[in-house]
């Protein structure tokens, strides 16, 4: 790849940081962008709107004839830097965010056109060696988060707990119309660093239109529903955590995550004392009359909610319900049925679909103005983004939008307006 100037890297970082899951800038991110983007691609990416845009709209915004622009977009999409959604012969383009986006797409397959070993080291440094944990906070902090744990369905006793379809990973897979599987980004990164575990890598599931896009671009392998369900079962048998898209309908991914390599689970562990961690609607329960304090569940728990204290006959199991993510991994590890999953006292209802999640995250993080006035270079849009951003971040506005009922009305009003304005299912 060509070397990016500091100005090009800064412009691209600024553009990426306006996504609901942003891109905190530092020298490591500049190196990553320099390995992935050519100078021409960086310039084009920095000027792309913040939402899905047709080829014609991009041509008008960028001042590049569509016949010349489309080959550039296709090349970037083949690298995972841009996503394209298609209906018939029409295409809508979207600049991939860092996460979930070109970080994962870069490592979901084995590539020879980029130095994946160098990238693996840089990605690890960017995520885990920042004393502020800035990027981890982008992913796992806030009221509305990018990812939610999905409980192991075989850990549930449906005579005891209520199970809705959107709580079931199998239903999310079953309701999709396309499926693909790629390498686990986290385990692939760990393998280049000599730290990989022995869990198979090809277990990262994509669903729906993104699955079609990733397989069309050679980033993932197209599979059928039965194979996707088999991978889900295999993940449970291996004691992996299902981390899925935080929506009720139209989920676009389910990862099968090991506690040793997964960045999201590491984020849960690091940030457990700094804010609410996303959980499933279930929580582990320990039957003290059956429990022998053997510690098998503590070894299996991916976030340290189950631990043991003491040694020998004095060893005791300790359970911290506050940090349990409700994955159900611990239940399979217990051979004497001393663990079960119970309904949480209050049920968390995920956003209905991806667009609602995006809008909620943008609103909560002070970035909604980028979705409304979405052309980075247009002067009027820059001014209006500044004005709206200032208004939404004023203390009175923050207090009003902290009310869940009012916030929901605001979000649904925005979505209705956006759909009417776009005249398309892609907004």
Image (cartoon, rainbow, N blue to C red):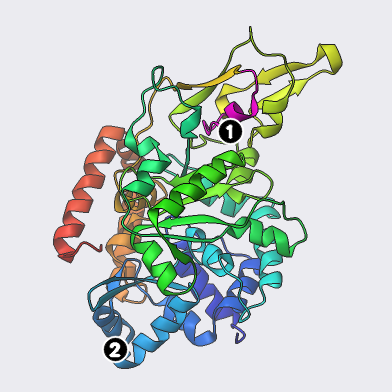
**Mark positioned earlier in the residue sequence (1 or 2):** 2
Q: Nearer the viewer, residue 243 or 93?
A: 243
Q: CA distance from mark 1 to mark 2?
A: 50 Å
Tell me residue 291's x, y (percent): 67, 13
Q: Quadrant of residue 238?
A: top right
Dominant secondary structure of the magenta stretch?
loop
- Seen in the picture, residue 264 relative to 34 is either above or below; the reply is above
User: Dot 1, crowdedness within 10 Å: few (<14), some or many (≥20)?
Assistant: many
- Seen in the picture, residue 128 relative to 31 is either above or below; the reply is above
- Residue carrying label 2: 66
Tell me residue 73's x, y (percent): 39, 82
User: Dot 2, crowdedness within 10 Å: few (<14), some or many (≥20)?
Assistant: some
Q: Quadrant of the C terminus?
A: bottom left
Tell me residue 57's x, y (percent): 25, 79
Q: Report the span colored magenta.
A: 324-336
Q: Residue furthest right?
A: 312
Report the residue at 65% width, 63% height from top: 123
Q: Nearer the viewer, residue 30 or 227?
A: 227
Q: Is residue 333 left or right of residue 426?
A: right
- Residue carrying label 1: 329
């Amino acid at each position: 790849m060509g070397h990016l100037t500091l100005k090009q890297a800064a412009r691209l970082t600024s553009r990426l940081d306006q996504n609901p899951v942003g891109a905190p800038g530092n020298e490591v991110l500049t190196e990553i962008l320099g390995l992935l983007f050519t100078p021409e691609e960086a310039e084009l990416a920095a000027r792309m709107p913040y939402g899905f845009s047709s080829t014609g709209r991009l041509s008008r915004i960028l001042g590049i004839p569509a016949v010349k622009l489309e080959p550039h977009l296709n090349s970037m999409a083949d690298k995972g830097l841009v996503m394209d959604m298609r209906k018939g012969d029409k295409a809508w383009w979207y600049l991939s965010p860092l996460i979930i986006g070109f970080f994962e797409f870069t490592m979901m397959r084995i590539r020879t056109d980029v130095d994946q070993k160098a990238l693996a080291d840089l990605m690890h440094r960017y995520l885990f060696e920042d004393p502020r944990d800035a990027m981890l906070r982008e992913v796992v902090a806030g009221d509305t988060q990018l990812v939610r744990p999905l409980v192991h369905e075989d850990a549930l006793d449906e005579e005891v707990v209520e199970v809705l379809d959107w709580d079931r990973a199998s239903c999310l897979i079953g309701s999709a119309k396309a499926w693909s599987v790629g390498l686990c980004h986290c385990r692939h990164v760990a393998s280049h660093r000599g730290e990989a575990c022995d869990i198979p890598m090809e277990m990262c599931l994509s669903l729906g239109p993104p699955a079609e896009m990733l397989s069309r671009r050679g980033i993932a392998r197209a599979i059928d529903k039965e194979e996707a369900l088999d991978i889900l079962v295999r993940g449970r048998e291996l004691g992996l955590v299902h981390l899925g898209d935080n929506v009720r309908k139209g989920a676009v991914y389910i990862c099968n995550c090991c506690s040793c390599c997964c960045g999201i689970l590491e984020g849960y562990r690091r940030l457990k004392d700094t804010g609410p961690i996303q959980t499933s609607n279930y929580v582990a329960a320990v039957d003290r009359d059956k429990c022998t304090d053997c510690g098998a569940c503590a070894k299996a728990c991916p976030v340290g909610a189950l631990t043991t204290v003491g040694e020998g006959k004095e060893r005791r199991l300790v359970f911290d319900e506050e940090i349990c993510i409700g994955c159900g991994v611990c239940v399979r590890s217990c051979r004497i049925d001393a663990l079960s999953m119970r309904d949480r006292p209050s049920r968390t209802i995920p956003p209905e679909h991806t667009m609602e999640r995006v809008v909620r995250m943008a609103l909560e993080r002070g970035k909604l103005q980028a979705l409304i006035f979405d052309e980075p270079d247009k002067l009027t849009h820059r001014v209006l983004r500044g004005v709206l951003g200032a208004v939404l971040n004023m203390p009175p506005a923050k207090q009003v939008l902290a009310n869940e009922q009012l916030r929901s009305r605001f979000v649904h009003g925005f979505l209705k307006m956006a759909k009417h304005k776009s005249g398309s299912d892609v907004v």
